[in-house]
Image (cartoon, rainbow, N blue to C red):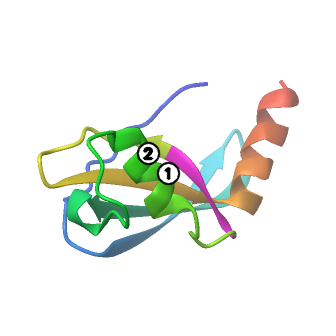
Amino acid sequence: MSYIAIPISSLPGKQDIEIDVTINGQKQALHYRVELFYWGDCRVPTFDRVECIRQLLADYDRDWTLYYIGSPTDEFVPITFVKREDLVKQRTLLRAR
């Protein structure tokens, strides 16, 4: 799979991103969400950051699926989600090759 990188600033809160692309004449809309998760928001304090991320994502909106975990800082980790239906579209296009 090829990639196109689009820089997104690290602002607090959710950033909903909609991208309309045309690839070889096929149009598709892609929906991403970038959200910052703060280590201090872990329900059960832990030194294990993987467990903290599991806790933070346990009840996340089921219409979105984990797409990418960014580089963590001492305060937060940026996580990118993609709409589940868009991920299915992407996989279908990849298999069609």
Spot occupied by residue 16 in the image (x, y as percentages of width and height): 43, 72
- Secondary structure category for the residue under label 2: helix
Amino acid type at mark 2: Glu
Residue drawn at 29 percent across, 75 percent down: 13
> Outermost residue toward the right?
96
From the viewer's side, name the closer residue of 89 and 46. Answer: 46
Q: Quadrant of residue 29?
A: bottom right
Q: Nearer the viewer, residue 1 or 45?
A: 45
Query: What residue range appears in magenta?
Result: 63-67
Identify residue type, mark 1.
Answer: Arg
At a point 79% along the width and 50% down the height, the residue shown is: 88
Q: Position of residue 25 (x, y in %)?
A: 72, 46
Going by the image, does 5 lie left or right of 57? left
Q: Callout 1: few (<14), some (14-19), or many (20+) C-alpha neighbours within 10 Å?
A: few
The residue where tag 1 is placed is 54
Q: Are marks 2 and 1 in contact (CB under 8 Å)?
A: yes
Q: Quadrant of residue 23?
A: top right
Name the residue at 42% across, 51% down.
Answer: 53
In the image: residue 9, left or right of residue 91: left
Residue, far left: 74
In this rendering, position of residue 63 left or right of residue 20? right
Q: Quadrant of the C terminus?
A: top right
Q: Which residue is mark 2?
A: 51
Give the position of the N terminus as an image quadrant.
Answer: top right
Is residue 65 in the magenta section? yes
